[in-house]
Image: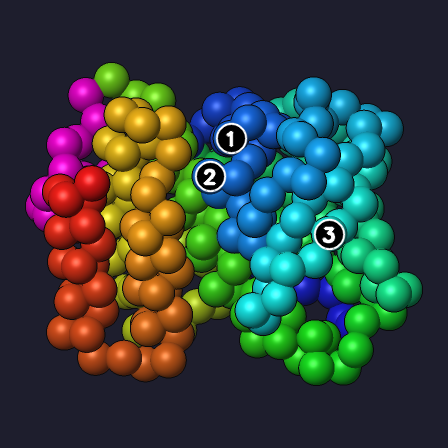
Amino acid sequence: MPDVDVAIALPYAPAPVFAALTDPERLPLWHPTHESWPAGPPEDLAVGREFVQRTRFMGRSNDVAWTVTAHEAPAMLALEGDAGLGVKLVSTYRLHPVADGTSLQVHARVSGAPRAMQVAMRRKARGLAADTGAGLSALLAADEPGAPAPGLRPSARPRPTVAGARPGWQRALGLASQLVDVAIAPAVRRVGRPPRRLAHDVSAVASAGARGARPARVWRTVRRAAAALRAH
């Protein structure tokens, strides 16, 4: 499978972004395919650390045995994974400081996978990147004093962006990011993790935009998520 490279712009300095990336306790809050830790979370993500992560992709759960191969704060994190049946994974995160925050370069490689999985990975790469950016934004926003209370209202915070996204998809990412700022971030602050329904709706917003859904449909998804938080 050809390598997949996606750039995500985040309005935070590299140090806090890297801290969120490398904190095993917070990884489930931003990793788009994470499902559970079969043997418990790793102690840290130092070079040489080995751990097993249960992921969910294309509706199926699968255990991946990861090994951390590079940890260079606050610039790079790299891992190699074995998903069984000859499927090998490589994930690399590179952080570059920019004028308005951090450019997070996500590199992924899958080898030995069935062709259907390879095609799906290529199609879903930008959606997974959107979920990564939204999850990291939620964590970092929750760490800031005076994070906005639940409710839908515009935010002055710059939105995470994904290089090369179509305009409609980029709009959906902006809506998903607003949902993070005004809904999921306060939930993280109060209960330690976002309600599963809200996390699902962030993905739904981005997916709707990727499919070219009309703005009204995307907004309905956002409003449903906000209502779910108020009922939580």
Kindly identify the residue that appears in the image at 11 percent across and 48 percent down.
Answer: 152
Q: Quadrant of the N terminus?
A: bottom right
Rounded to the nearest whole Å, what is the CA distance between mark 1 and mark 3? 19 Å
Which residue does the numbered mark 3 point to in the structure image?
A: 63
Is label 2 or label 3 in front?
A: 3
Q: In which quarter of the image is the C terminus?
A: top left
Q: Tell me the crowding category of disc 1: few under 14, some 14 to 19, or many 20 or more residues within 10 angstroms, Cα based.
A: some
Which residue does the numbered mark 2 point to in the structure image?
A: 29
Q: How far across and down, in percent of the image, does residue 44 sit?
A: 69, 22
Rounded to the nearest whole Å, what is the CA distance between mark 1 and mark 2? 5 Å
Q: Which residue lies furthest to the front in this view?
A: 38
Name the kind of residue labelled 2 in the image: Leu
Name the kind of residue labelled 3 in the image: Asp
The answer to whether marks 1 and 3 mark residues whose Cβ atoms lie closer than 8 Å is no
Along the line of sight, which residue is nearer the eye, 61 or 126?
61
Query: The residue tagged with tag 3: helix, strand or loop?
Result: strand
What segment carries the magenta color? 146-158
Which residue does the numbered mark 1 point to in the structure image?
A: 26
Rounded to the nearest whole Å, what is the CA distance between mark 2 and mark 3? 18 Å
